[in-house]
Amino acid sequence: MTNYKVGMAFSKDFQGNTPLGHIGVKLPVYIRLLELCEAKGWEVYVLTKKTYKGDGIFEGSWKFSKGKFEKIKSPVKIDLVYDRSAGVKFPPDVDESTIWVNTRAFKVLCWDKWKAYRKIGSFMPKTFLVEKEEDLQLILQKIRTQWVVIKPYNGLKGLGVFIGPKDKAKNFKFGKKYKHYIAQEFLDTSSGIPEITEGLHDLRVAIVNKGAVWSHVRVPKTGSYMANAAAGGILTEVDYSLVPESVKKIVTEVSERFYKQYDNPCYSIDFGIDLDGVPKIFEINDQIGFPRWEMNNRDNFLFELTSGFENKFKKKFS
């Protein structure tokens, strides 16, 4: 076993006696990931991007060993960083001395919904870039569905999103927080997914090492079309064997592309199934939400994650 240094990086400053105080109910899953890394013979750290100095060096970190955290003030050179931070300014563009999971290029792809559409648009609902509010009227005329989805091209958690009839969309106002939006043809998912759910849904498949490691379905609360957790969506784990073959085919094709182009990233894909049973991708996410402790595929996800780290070490240092 090689004594590589592995770190999991977050956005926030660390407070109190633990660097993971912000994690909440999924804390045992994060601890298990650290333990699995430690079992590989690696030195394990929890990091914040705010102490990053370049070239893989963090001046401030917490070392994890035998179930306990120790605060480290001296600089530490990390060989592989599993990035759990928000935004696209981290990791840096060029830092070949460090392995980044994921690279900044992949984070930008996921963050920029228009860029993602240009990359995998054949699997997505028809989408248009709306650069200025005054362009919206003309673009709405190109939308073939009676309803439309308008959302910030770089938004999160369903914030700033409009879903509704095109006649009401004409009065949509751009928020000051977002420069550009996208307009997307509405995908009616009300027929559900056989053996999984009966109505409106958002099916998420998490991908590590080019393969599906766990999946879940989110359904919106009554009267809403927003299935994400921030909008009150209800999440249920799904056995991947029940996922339609049409979805699996897309997962295989997209994961093959991304594996080669973005150095084996870890991410998830959100799908909807239309009234004809045809799947479409809603978006890709560079940050995989961890399973809860009691979920069946928790260890499948964690084992593949650590295996992916190991493969990256072999590729870089062999």
Image (spheres, rainbow, N blue to C red):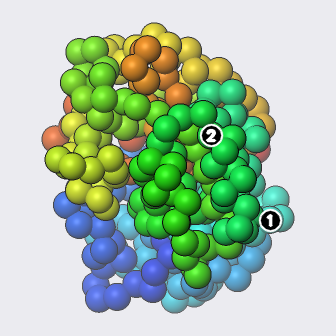
Check disc 1 and give the amino acid type: Asp
| In the image: residue 94, left or right of residue 198 | right
Q: Which residue is mark 2?
A: 143
Q: Position of residue 109 (x, y in %)?
A: 69, 51
Which residue lies most toward the front here? 167
Residue shown at 55% from the left, 76% from the top:
175
Check disc 2 and give the amino acid type: Ile
Q: Which callout, 2 or 1, points at the residue further toward the start of the chain? A: 1
The secondary structure type at the circle numbered 1 is loop
| In the image: residue 97, left or right of residue 175 | right
CA distance for labels 2 and 1: 36 Å
Foreground: 211 or 80? Answer: 211
Instruction: Reply above or below: 3 against 217.
Output: below
Which residue lies most toward the top here? 245
Residue shown at 72% from the left, 53% from the top:
138
Instruction: Reply above or below: 301 against 14.
Output: above
Residue shown at 23% from the left, 56% from the top:
232
Q: Position of residue 79 (x, y in %)?
A: 65, 59
Q: Which residue is mark 1?
A: 93
